[in-house]
Image: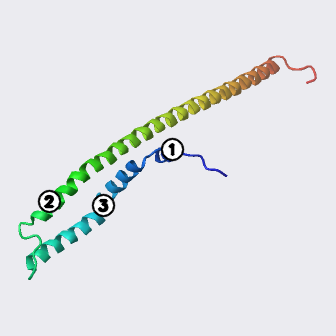
């Protein structure tokens, strides 16, 4: 049995390579794993440059390290903003889909309420009809009694 596609599936299929790449970079950079790995690398970088006996490739105040961070930030910021824009777009699509679902549910509920009202009215009409028959039977007793 084939499963029906959701709006999310359609949205994912319409994504370009660049959009998928921006999403995965933003997910990676926004994780604890990235922060921990980057912290370890920075500590190693600084430690090796402070205690290096022979070759200091980036002496204190670590200008090369600052340059690497600046380059990383220059590329990371627009990529993360692209991912945030796509998330906003997904949120708008989901909100629109939720709204359509709520409208359909509201219409179904209104139809059910109308049906229940009709059933209730039909029952009341039958009860009134039965009561009227009982009243007539009490007022005009049948000759067989």
Residue 134 in the image: state x and y as whole percent.
78, 23
Of 90 and 106, which appears nearest the observer?
90
Distance between the alpha carbons at the discs numbered 3 and 2: 22 Å
Q: Residues within 10 Å of mark 2 (few under 14, many from 20)?
A: few
As drawn, the label of residue 67 is 2
Q: Hey, which residue is sitting farthest bottom in the picture?
A: 53
Specify the quadrant of the image occupied by residue 96: top left
Residue drawn at (6%, 69%) of the image: 60
Closer to us: mark 3 or mark 1? 1
As drawn, the label of residue 10 is 1
Q: If you read the primary sequence from the N terminus, does the residue marked by circle 3 or circle 2 appear first?
A: 3
- Which residue is the site of mark 3? 31
Residue 127 in the image: state x and y as whole percent.
72, 26
Q: If you read the primary sequence from the N terminus, does the residue marked by circle 3 or circle 1 appear first?
A: 1
Q: Secondary structure at mark 2?
A: helix
Distance between the alpha carbons at the discs numbered 3 and 1: 26 Å
Quick one: quadrant of the C terminus? top right
């Amino acid at each position: 049995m084939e499963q029906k596609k959701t709006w999310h599936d359609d949205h994912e299929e319409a994504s370009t390579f660049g959009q998928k790449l921006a999403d995965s970079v933003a997910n990676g950079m926004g994780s604890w794993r990235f922060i921990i790995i980057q912290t370890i690398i920075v500590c190693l970088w600084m430690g090796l440059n402070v205690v290096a006996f022979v070759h200091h490739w980036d002496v204190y105040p670590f200008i090369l390290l600052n340059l690497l961070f600046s380059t990383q930030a220059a590329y990371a910021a627009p990529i993360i903003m692209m991912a945030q824009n796509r998330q906003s777009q997904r949120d708008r699509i989901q909100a629109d889909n939720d709204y359509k679902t709520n409208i359909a549910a509201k219409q179904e509920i209104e139809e059910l309420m109308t049906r229940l009202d009709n059933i209730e009215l039909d029952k009341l009409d039958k009860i009134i009809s039965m009561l009227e028959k009982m009243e007539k039977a009490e007022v005009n007793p049948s000759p067989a009694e």
